Amino acid sequence: MKLIHNSSELVTTVGGAQRGHTLGALQIIPNGAVAIQGETILEVGTSTDLLEKYPVAERIDARQRSIVPGFVDPHTHLVWAGNRAHEYEMRLQGKSYMEIMAAGGGIASTVNATRKASLDELVAQAMERAMRAFAHGTTTMEAKSGYGLDLETEFRQLEAVLEINKAGPIELVPTYMGAHAIPVEFKGDTAGYTRWLCEVALPETKTWWLKHAPGQALPFVDVFCEKDVFEMDETREILQTARDLGFPLKLHADEFENLGGASLGAEFNAASVDHLVKTSLEDIQRMAKSETVAVSLPGTPFGLAQSEYSPAREIIAANAFLALATDLNPGTTWNESMQFMQALATRYMKLTPSQALAASTINSAKAVLRDATIGSIEAGKQADILILSVPDYRILTYRYGTNMVADVIKKGKFYSQE
Ligand code: NIG
Ligand code: FE
């Protein structure tokens, strides 16, 4: 048994994911402590009470620093090979992200590199990013395929996710995203590729998964719903097929144009709809009437040097669930830090520090359907906890571009980052 004690404050949410204006309701225990039994949180209280109650527990001194829940990053494209620094330079010279993609660059250039990479190379490159995220406080991270598009490479990406997950300590939540772009083999034939995804790739992915990850829940299926990529009809077809096969769903929508994807995601009960920059009020209201979490990725407009971010105030006012994620990927946003996303969200989406924290913990846990077991420091939950290097959790958003996580506790095990 372990006891983390002598914090400046223990900061958590209680009672589950937070809709609308309940976002950011925190429980703050001055001089808080947490007792851990194995991988699980046993009790939360003040240091005085818990030191007295558990005198023989192994002690971890929080040194008058802040304790917060481990961050959950519910949207990443973790597994890829190479980089696209040359495209960043093209964007600086005035080419847009979608122009580069239409000219055969963008996602397609990472697909080329990823197809050529071995499993070991993919694991090595993704592991480095996963460990960087872990050092910055991400204890659970969603990870998508989508840089293979053919079966062989997509499965190699999923295999890399399984390997990293097995190695730990970070926990990965897998997503199959064959519907990320139209591969060159289909020469712009979106309808043909959509048919192949529904008739061949999705059923084959299920078979592959049951064989290679027996006993593990099916991965999410995600679709890049966007003008000139998968538009509404194709997205509906893919979501419908995936749902019929039993896959849980996610969706990319409204990154560049509004097609109504957020409403579609809510209609399909997707765990989350992500990006949500060009989202209409009607779409927001549809999400608010569902359990679908609105996931904002502020690193993406920042990475693209765009001035428009998710309409967070409207999402909150409509009573929807709002969460944050990095969108870690080689095109728009190569950043592993949920701390930086919180700093961006307070500046450009006008979240308060407490809202940014809840959106990065309990609500982002709901976006990967894990809010019952992670995302807060409560008795019975998995012991995924951070000790910050600072005494006030609000410093996490006030400062930025630097790591303010001192120690990561994952499933009850202690990993110092200092
Ligand atoms: O979420 N929009 C689609 N996918 C990623 C970008 C992927 C890439 O450019 O490699 C995103 O922003
Ligand atoms: Fe994405």
Image (tube, grey):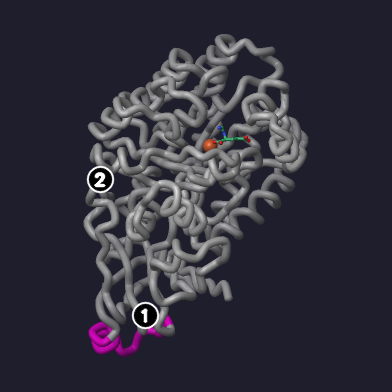
Q: Is residue 235 visible?
A: yes
Left or right? Give the position of 206 relative to 185.
left
| Residue 396: % across, % down | 45, 65
Q: Amino acid at mark 1?
A: Ser
Mark number for residue 270?
none
Asked whether mark 1 and ligand 2 are closer than 8 Å, the reply comes as: no
Magenta-drawn segment: 48-62
Residues packed near mark 1 inside 10 Å, few (<14), some (14 to 19) or many (20 plus): many
Q: Position of residue 9 (x, y in %)?
A: 33, 76
Q: Is residue 202 above or below residue 27?
A: above
Q: Which quadrant of the structure image shows residue 51?
A: bottom left
Q: Residue 275, image x and y in percent?
A: 46, 36
Q: Does the beta carbon of the residue at mark 2 sit less than 8 Å from ligand 2?
A: no
Tell me the quadrant of the picture where the C terminus can be found.
bottom right
Please provide percent x and percent y for residue 264.
36, 23
Q: As rendered, which of 154 and 109 lies closer to the eye?
A: 109
Tag 1 residue: 7
Residue type pointed to by label 2? Arg
Q: Is residue 289 above or below residue 412?
A: above
Place residue 181 in its image quadrant.
Answer: top right
Q: Residue at x 55, y 38 (%)?
A: 306
Q: How many marks?
A: 2
Mark 2 lies on residue = 19
